[in-house]
Amino acid sequence: MKTLFKSCLLLLLVTTLSQCRKGDQPEFLFRVSLWANEDHTWYKAFLHFGELLEERSQGRMKVEVYPSEQLAKEIESIRLIQAEVIEMTVTASLLSNWIDIAAFCELPFLLQDSSDQAALINGPLGKRIEKEILEKTGLRPVGVFQRGPRHLTSNRPIRHPDDLDGLIIRVPSVPSFVTAWSAMGAKPTPMAFSEVFTALQQGTIEAQENPFALILSAGFPEVQQYVNLTEHVMSWSYPVVGERQFQELPPDLQTIFLETAKDMQQYERRLFLASEQKVRQELERRGMEFVEVDKVAFARKCEKAIYQSLSPEMQTVYQNFVDSRKNK
């Protein structure tokens, strides 16, 4: 009942926003719901996407971007797209609440470096992930946004999993994250991203984990002292559009849409690469201390638990990928 009530409120909000728009109405409007704020590369990439899409379609397609969970949190955004209330968002491992295979988008300690990541995204496993997202969730991936490695932030240095004992860590609502941090001795707490800063400030949680860019853009240097360089996830996300909404486009606009989405992916990648080193320097300038950790110890502590948490089919997928990496 609460979910239905929230959806009704959001539908009313979106309808009201649509009625308030001035000027000529486009044939096709794409409303993008993001949890990232205006400083994030995703927001800037979607603004770029909107400009190109409107120009190339001669005004027939337009994009409205709503950052900072203005429309909905990530999981609610997915449901709103499925209900055809809005059209687009960015997502990845959260889809493991719908399809098991999505867990591989951010499975802790599966990938060791960017070459591993590229092999997964561009290989058979990556193609299967995209196929199942489309067929089983009704969302069409239209590109890939690569993210920096996820690191743990805290107010005490964490060098070894033994240091985690009882630490309350915010995690996204992703089962493999809960499994991994529990196995390492922490107390993972799923929480919407918009609530994290206040929860850290008030002491409801003690730590969180994210890439450098998000640690900075969310203002976490104000409430966290250490960046523990765990690199526990080499992550990426997919900009997605509702498949039913996409199929409403005539063939010529579908082509423009997909080509423009690829340009958005390249634009976001350039922004990401340009900012990654600068972001680390800015975190240091704001007083955060970087802590080297025993990554092997972290991986060993949770490897068995992660594997056992997978279904038998996903265990086979996991082992096949690990074996293929060894045979490179």
Image (cartoon, rainbow, N blue to C red):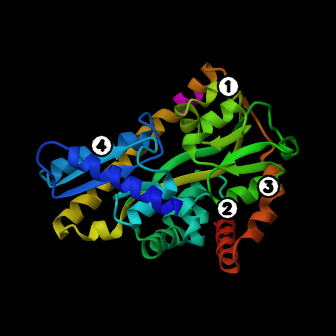
User: Element type at marker 1?
Assistant: loop
What's drawn in magenta, residue-wise?
277-281
Give the labeled residue for mark 3: 182
**Disc 4 residue type?**
His
Spatial CA span between label 2 and label 3: 11 Å
Instruction: Answer whether residue 141 is visible to the viewer in this image.
Output: no
Along the line of sight, the residue nearer the viewer: 77 or 111: 77
- Tell me which numbered mark, 1 or 3, is placed earlier along the sequence: 3
- Tell me which numbered mark, 2 or 4, is placed earlier along the sequence: 4
**Disc 2 residue type?**
Pro
Q: Residue at x 16, y 66 (%)?
A: 252
Spatial CA span between label 4 and label 3: 40 Å
User: Element type at marker 2?
Assistant: helix
Badge nearest the viewer, 2 or 4: 2
Give the labeled residue for mark 2: 175
Badge nearest the viewer, 1 or 3: 3
Give the labeled residue for mark 1: 288
Say above or below: 315 vs 139: below
Spatial CA span between label 2 and label 4: 33 Å
- The image shows residue 243 at horizontal and vertical percentages of 34, 69
Mark 2 packing: few (<14 Cα in 10 Å), some, or many (20+)? Answer: many
**Disc 1 residue type?**
Met
- Tell me which numbered mark, 4 or 3, is placed earlier along the sequence: 4
Q: Which residue is at the far bottom?
A: 313
Q: Residue at x 66, y 80 (%)?
A: 313
- Tell me which numbered mark, 4 or 1, is placed earlier along the sequence: 4
Give the labeled residue for mark 4: 48
Magenta residue check for 287: no
Say above or below: 222 vs 28: above
**Disc 3 residue type?**
Ser
- The image shows residue 244 at horizontal and vertical percentages of 31, 70
Q: Is residue 178 left or right of residue 252?
A: right
